[in-house]
Amino acid sequence: MFKKIRFTAEYFFYYLKKNILFIFLGLAVGSIAFIEKNNLVVLYQRLQTKQQSYGIEGLYRSDNLPLNISQLISFGLTEINDNNRITNSPLIQSLDIRNNNLEYLFTINTNYVWQNGKKLVSSDIVYPYSGIEFSYPDDSHLVIKLNSSFSPILSLFTQPLFLKNSLVGLSDYRVTSKTLQEGYLKYLHLQNAKTGAKLVYKFYPNEKDLINAFKLGEVDSITLTNIPSDFKSWPGIAITQQIDTSKYSAIFLNTEKINQKPLRQALAYATPKTNEKNQRCLSPISPNSWAYTSGIKEYNYNPTRSKELFDPKSLSSIKLLVADRKLIDRAEVIKQAWEKILSIKVDVLSSVNQSVNLAEYDAILAYGSILIDPDQFSFWHSTQTQQNNITHLNNPRIDKLLEEGRNTFDLIERNKIYQDFQRYLLEESPAIFLEFPVTYTINRVK
């Protein structure tokens, strides 16, 4: 019995002597693992995180990223809520508005650090807007002064901030690498500093290349304006429909050529429109905006009313320019309706692959942008005909409302102004508002 115990003890000490280094190493690793268990869990999660790849249609440079991507990387001074109201972003501790809305004192949250480790200071903040003076009393204060009152001013600062000539931002997602081709982005890699989540964006010049990239497995998600027929039976994908209220399609009428309001209204009633309520666009102000009103003329498709308003002696033909290839099919539908209902000749031409003189055309089928702020001065004011007022609208009442809208700071008063603006604009009918585009996001199901 004693010999057996002695043998066991000698064997144990022999094993301990032979493996002492490994035993101590194991104890050390175990102790460290116990102490750093939370960090190790995060590391494990990061290693397990799969990257998601997105296909993007369009040509983009580093300085004009799609807004949804730039907002992942950084913040602006301000941000918008669900009703398009402007609020301070996390970068701002407080905002003091002085001197009759001509001076804005921002107190910066200097706890924020740029993604390269540099502490945020007020002088880092620069926006390329004319008519605005920036000054920096100290590292935590920024003063913005205006030459004249401009109520949409805070909406301009929703644009995400980056360190000069870089993609270094202030949010959790940071750019880890990028690839350019002829000055345009080909690949953009992002990673979340907290979760380790990885996002890859691959850019394609047109929708055809985008679709092919998805089919070949280059990307996991794409967004299209139409679903290819073969995708409807494609295995392992999920399709989600969205209504894009950031822009709208409309027929912009040249009011200098089609200069009688009843003619423009007749064309509006003769234009087929969607029956989908949420997709239908009634005015150039977002239906999500605090300034929107539905109490305006809708110009639903009504051939009878169109014929009542139309004077065939005043208009016998129309040149309709299509400004976007995605609207070409819609232009043909409009052409057929106008010719059938009003018996006028409609010539449809495209500006997609050629430069044209917009002034030569009677109507332009195009997309219009919906701004964060309801200010519509640049699109409809009579002084803007050489810029964005492509309808050449010249209406003193509308001009006055647009001027008041950008010089009034009381939200209730601004709401009244823009509701009146929408009513008078739709009555004047310089444009036929059609719909918000529908997009389809196609995701690979794994």
Image: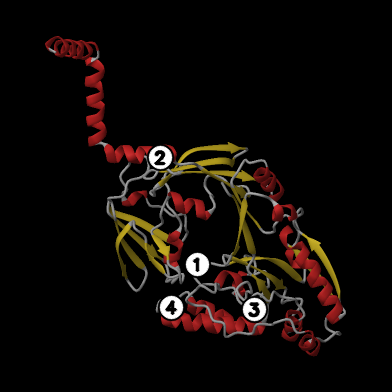
Q: Which one is in front in this view, the residue at disc 4 or the one at disc 3?
A: 4
Sequence-first disc among 4 and 1: 1
Q: Sort mark 4 into few (<14), some (14-19) or many (20+) by Cα contacts within 10 Å.
A: some
The answer to which of marks 4 and 3 sits earlier in the sequence is 3
The amino acid pointed to by label 4 is Thr
Camera-side mark, 3 or 2: 2
Q: Which residue is mark 2?
A: 46
Instruction: Point out which mark residue 372 bears.
Output: 1
Mark 4, residue position: 408
* Label whose residue precedes the other's in the sequence (3 or 2): 2
Q: Considering only vertical position in the picture, is 255 above or below 444?
A: below
Q: Which residue is located at x 36 percent, y 71 percent?
A: 101
Callout 3: SS: loop
Mark 1 and 2 residues: CB-CB less than 8 Å, in contact?
no
Estimate the spatial distance between the alpha carbons at disc 1 and disc 3, rounded to whole Å.
24 Å
Give percent across and percent down for residue 4.
Answer: 17, 12
Relative horizontal placement of residue 349, taking residue 52 as reference (left or right): right
Q: Which label belongs to residue 394?
A: 3
Q: Position of residue 129 (x, y in %)?
A: 47, 58
Q: Identify residue type, mark 2.
A: Arg
Q: Quadrant of residue 53?
A: top right
Q: Is residue 42 left or right of residue 18?
A: right
